[in-house]
Amino acid sequence: GESVGLHLPTLSVQEGDNSIINCAYSNSASDYFIWYKQESGKGPQFIIDIRSNMDKRQGQRVTVLLNKTVKHLSLQIAATQPGDSAVYFCAESERLQAQLWSLALGRLYFGRGTQLTVWP
Amino acid sequence: DTGVSQDPRHKITKRGQNVTFRCDPISEHNRLYWYRQTLGQGPEFLTYFQNEAQLEKSRLLSDRFSAERPKGSFSTLEIQRTEQGDSAMYLCASSLATSANGEQFFGPGTRLTVL
């Protein structure tokens, strides 16, 4: 659970292009995954989450893909904008009660982060 | 602004001094978390509370660190005899234990510099 990592520390894209940020995890017991965005001088901001019983979830301009077989998580940002420039972290957690998704999410394990820079 | 506030936002202290940080969570949230973040790294879990009970502490939380949440609302994190290695951003987050996804809302952090 403490081995969440990212493949690329930096990513530069042109405005309007799609961005893909990847993340690997090693804890097979992790069953809840979150992507956070952190701008300079601010705390992490929730983007999107996914539970282990899903392999894809879509939000507004963002999609998270989960491949449990290879323990890989990715965040796709469509039509990337300059305001998307930030550090992106994946985080994982385990439920302490198997039957109830809503209860007992404890600590989050964060990866190192990827710096996304969007050029106009 | 997530609704989680932290005070102070910045703290500069000399090695050996004690410091105390405060976190005010979103009012209806019963869970409160403390994380530490160093430059270029993701946040590292320190401890968390459900109401006033401290449910889990990381190995990172040495005996110089103590956290409290006496009335189940705001929390304080105290570091005694600060060391240069304590320099970091200290983040607080809160959540509602019974929410659908247990999303943790982070505050802006307190940046500690130990000289």
Image: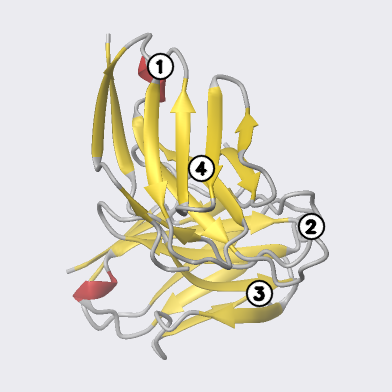
In the displayed structure image, the side of residue B56 where residue B91 appears, left or right? left
Q: Are marks 3 and 2 in contact (CB under 8 Å)?
A: no
Which of the 4 image quadrants contains residue B90? bottom left
How far is the residue under mark 1 from the one under mark 2? 32 Å
Residue named by callout 3: B69
Q: Are marks 2 and 4 in contact (CB under 8 Å)?
A: no
| Amino acid type at image mark 4 | Trp
The tag on residue A80 is 1
The crowding category of the residue bearing disc 2, from other C-alpha atoms within 10 Å (few below 14, some 14 to 19, many at least 20), is some
**What residue is drawn where x is 35% and y is 26%?**
A85
Please state, as top left, top right, bottom left or bottom right, where the C terminus of chain B lies in the image: bottom left
The tag on residue A102 is 2
Judged from this view, the residue extending furthest toward the left is: B115
| Amino acid type at image mark 2 | Ser
How far is the residue under mark 2 from the one under mark 4? 18 Å
Residue situated in front as seen by the camera: A82 or A4 = A4
**What residue is drawn where x is 66% and y is 73%?**
B49
> In terms of secondary structure, where does tag 4 sit?
strand
